[in-house]
Amino acid sequence: MTDKIETLDIPILYSFRRCPYAMRARLSLAISGQRHVLREVVLRDKPAAMIVASAKATVPVLVLPDGTVLEQSLDIMDWALGLNDPDNWFNPAVGTIEDIQALIAECDGPFKNNLDRYKYANRYDGADPVNHRSEGLEFLNKLNDRLADQPFLAGQRSCLADFAIFPFIRQFANTDRDWFDAQDLKPLQSWLDGHLTSDLFAGVMKKWPQWKPGDAETHLP
C-alpha cells in the first residue's frame, strides 16, 4: 500500500449509500453544486486509497485536490456550503446557527448512542434495545414539538439541522417502521416523509456499483 494520498483535479468523496453520515455529505455537495468524484465503498472491502487518506477508515471521506482530507461529515457540509449555500442552510429562519448546531450535537451525541444500541443491540454488551428506543424517543418528541407549528426545525424553511439530522431519524424509524408509524409523532413523521420523497434525497440515493482502482470515475453533480 502506498502512503501517498491520491488526489484528482476535483474532490474525491468516499461514500457508502446507506450511511447517514455519508448522506449528509452527499446532500451538502449536491445542494451546493460542488463537482466531485463519488467512490462507492463496500464496508467489508474498503479501498486502500481511502484508508491511506483517512486512517479512521469510515465514510465519508472527502479528499480535496490540494491533498486536504475532510474526515467528518459536518466538516464536509461546512466546506461545501461555505463555497455555495443557495438555500441558506447556514441562516436559519428562526434562531441562530449556534442553536441548530446544538441540536445537531444532541443528535450526534445522546441520540446516536441510543440509536446504535437500539438498532445494533447485539453489538453492545448488556444493551436493552427497548430501553434505548424509549430514550431515543425523547429526542424524537423534542423534534416533534419543534415541528408542531412550523414545517422545518428552524421555521418556515429548511436549514442545516434538517439535513444533518433527518438521515438519522430515517435510520431510527426504519429499525421498526410499524412502531415508528404508530407513535403520536405526526409533525415529525410528515417532516421525515417530506425529506424522503424529495428530489434532492432521491438524487443522492442513486445506487452506484462498488468502486475499485482502475474503474471509470463517477463524476457528480
Image: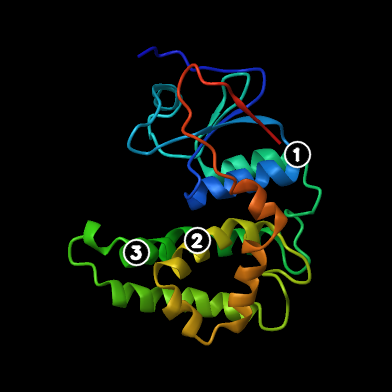
Give whichever of discs 2 and 3 has the lower sequence position.
3
Helix, strand, or loop for circle 1?
loop
Residue sitting at x 59%, y 76%:
188
Q: Secondary structure at mark 2?
A: helix
Q: Amino acid at mark 3?
A: Lys
Q: Label 1 amino acid?
A: Gly
Image vertical order of residue 126 relative to residue 184, above or below: above
Q: Nearer the viewer, residue 114 or 90?
A: 114
User: Which numbered disc, 3 or 1, marks the residue that appears first in the sequence?
Assistant: 1
Label of residue 215 in the image:
none
Asked whether the beta carbons under mark 2 and mark 3 sit within 8 Å of each other, the answer is no
Q: Residue furthest left?
A: 125
Is 210 on the left-hand or right-hand side of 203?
left
Q: Quadrant of residue 193?
A: bottom right
**Tag 1 near tag 2, CB within 8 Å:** no
Q: Is residue 87 rendered to the left or right of residue 108?
A: right
Q: Which residue is mark 1?
A: 33
For disc 2, the marked residue is: 168
